[in-house]
Image (tube, rainbow, N blue to C red):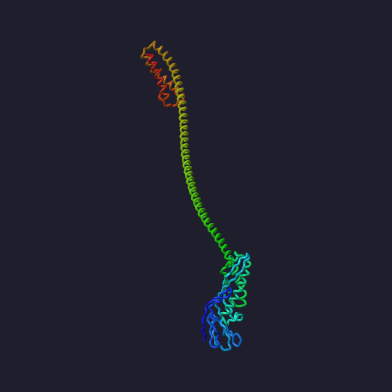
Amino acid sequence: MTEDAPTTTGKSEADDFELTSNAPDTPLRRWGVVSVAPSEHLIVYRRGQLDPALCGQGGRFFKRPSDTYVAIPTTLKEVCFQANQITADNVDVRIRGMVLYRIADPVRIHRLINFTRRQQAEAKLARVIADMCRSTAKWLVANMDLAECNRRRKEEIAAILRREVEGVVSESWGVEIVTIDVQDVYIQDDALFTSMQAAFKAEQSRLASLAQLESRQSLERRRLESERALEETRQALALEKSRRDADLKMAQLALARKKDEAEFSRNQQRTEQAAALAQQEALAEQALRREAAAAALELARLKTAAMALLSDEEIRVLRARLAAEDSAGRASLERLFLTESLPALAETVGKSLEQSKMVVYQGEGGGPVPMALSAVLDVLQERLAGIA
């Protein structure tokens, strides 16, 4: 059976580290059934030799008086360490860090540390790990200034600490380093810390003022950009309206020009038609004038011919009358004129008209023939009146 022992939970403290442990310090049994918790690894020596068949995580066996066993915890352990060091810029700082580890190879670690008293063994292992972290941290801080310590504590210091410590405890002791973290960097000098805080606060206040100024400038810049964009939009709209108005005016001018051109073309056509008509009328009037002149000339010629014929006939009639006066009276003279002189006169006029070129001219006289006949009749009437 397993002997029950009280479980202790507390802190094993040294000068510059502390170990949080929940492992009970259980006394070993001399004989009987021995069993360990699932979070413990059982290691058994029988007849002075390690018996692998009886070893194991959460193992159980019957202990003989000559057997030796030990239970090694494999749970996670946390050790916090602190280290004082002067930085490269002569500032006294105190670094506080944390190491999280577990025993990964119990067979290897139990040969280096006696786990018969578990709490003492765990404290020793924690002290060794903390000392390694402190020494490495001191070396790192001594080669950095304060600003670098604050800025690089997460990146470089913790990474270098883990690499240095893990290279020793993991390969040689069988301890797995889960993580190493540098939690705080304290300034030991309160006056320096206060002045740095004041400078930091002033810097933060300056940054806050700059941020507010930049925010106001950004808002003002955005407002100006908005106003500029709005003004550009307005100008663009005004320009577009002006362009459209100009296009409309150009279209109106083009339409008016087309109307003017069409009107000018119509006026020109009317003028040309009027000129052509006037020219045709002038040509027609000239032709009429020429025809009238030709007709007048022909009439004059006919009159002249008729006058000549009448003169000849008159002379002949006169001669005949003179000859007839001697033998006849007035009646006989008229019969003689109508039977002899008038046919002869008509024959003469007809021959004269056959030899002349006739031009038909519609006027008040009705034409050259009626005019000629009228002229002959007038002459005859005058002759008859003279005879009477």
Foreground residue, 229 or 61? Answer: 61
Residue 365, position as x, y percentages in the image: 40, 24
Residue 55, position as x, y percentages in the image: 57, 83
Foreground residue, 187 or 154? Answer: 187
Residue under the point 61% across and 74% down:
131
Foreground residue, 62 or 66? Answer: 66
Residue under the point 53% across and 57% down:
209
Quadrant placement of the C terminus = top left
Relative to 342, 39 lies left or right: right
Relative to 356, 65 lies left or right: right
Residue 43, position as x, y percentages in the image: 57, 83
Foreground residue, 205 or 365? Answer: 205
Q: Is residue 169 above or below residue 370?
A: below
Residue lying farthest to the front in this orientation: 191
Q: Is residue 224 above or below residue 197?
A: above
Q: Is residue 119 above or below residue 143?
A: below
